[in-house]
Image: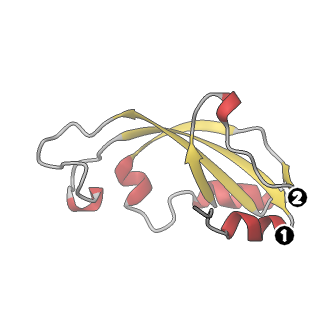
Amino acid sequence: MFTAPLVGTAARPEMPEGCRKLTVAQPQAYMSELEIEGQKNPFRRQRTAAAEGGGNTLLVLKRQTSPRRTFECPSALPITDCAPDSGAWYEVNFESYACSTDALVTLNTPPTK
């Protein structure tokens, strides 16, 4: 699973050669920061759907739609330290891919500076 900012289609992140898109985008979801950061596996359902469709890679595209709204929980604190506040809200889209072993190595290699 990989995450990237959700921006206009022209600026979408490019997957490496060897990755074939299986779904254009699963239906968008709106999730709170706590739902994303406060769970061990927040995208389990989408990862399972990607695997059932023949994919081995899930691209999670997210865009903040609403920031945190409480002064008691500044953005420097992890949202898990701010319960019961749900934190910021995000629009989230999902794309599944079937990627070759070489493409997975590329995806898992940090970019050089």
Assess disc 1: are there few (<14), some (14-19) or many (≥20) residues with their C-alpha within 10 Å of its C-alpha.
Answer: few
- Of label 2 and label 1, which has the lower sequence position? 2
Q: In 3D space, how far apart are the residues under numbered discs 2 and 1 (Cα atoms)?
A: 7 Å
Give SS at disc 2: loop
Query: Does residue 29 appear to the left or right of 73 in the view shown?
Result: right
> What x and y, as percent, mark residue 78?
28, 59
The answer to whether the residue labelled 2 contacts the one labelled 1, judged by CB atoms less than 8 Å apart, is yes
**Is residue 101 depicted above or below 67 in this figure?**
below
Residue at image position (66%, 51%) is 59
Three-letter amino acid code at the position of disc 2: Gly
Assess disc 2: are there few (<14), some (14-19) or many (≥20) residues with their C-alpha within 10 Å of its C-alpha.
Answer: some
In the foreground, 5 or 25: 5
Residue at image position (66%, 33%) is 11
Residue 107: quarter of image? bottom right
In the foreground, 40 or 108: 108
Give SS at disc 1: helix
Residue at image position (77%, 64%) is 56
> What x and y, as percent, mark residue 49?
72, 55
Query: Does residue 96 appear to the left or right of 21 in the view shown?
Result: left
Three-letter amino acid code at the position of disc 1: Asp
Quadrant where the C terminus is found in the figure: bottom right
> What x and y, as percent, mark residue 94?
65, 45
Q: Which mark is residue 67?
A: none
Residue 92: quarter of image? top right
Quadrant where the N terminus is found in the figure: bottom right
The residue indicated by pointer 1 is 102
Residue at image position (21%, 53%) is 84
* Residue positioned most to the left: 72
> What x and y, as percent, mark residue 3?
58, 53
Q: Which mark is residue 18?
A: 2
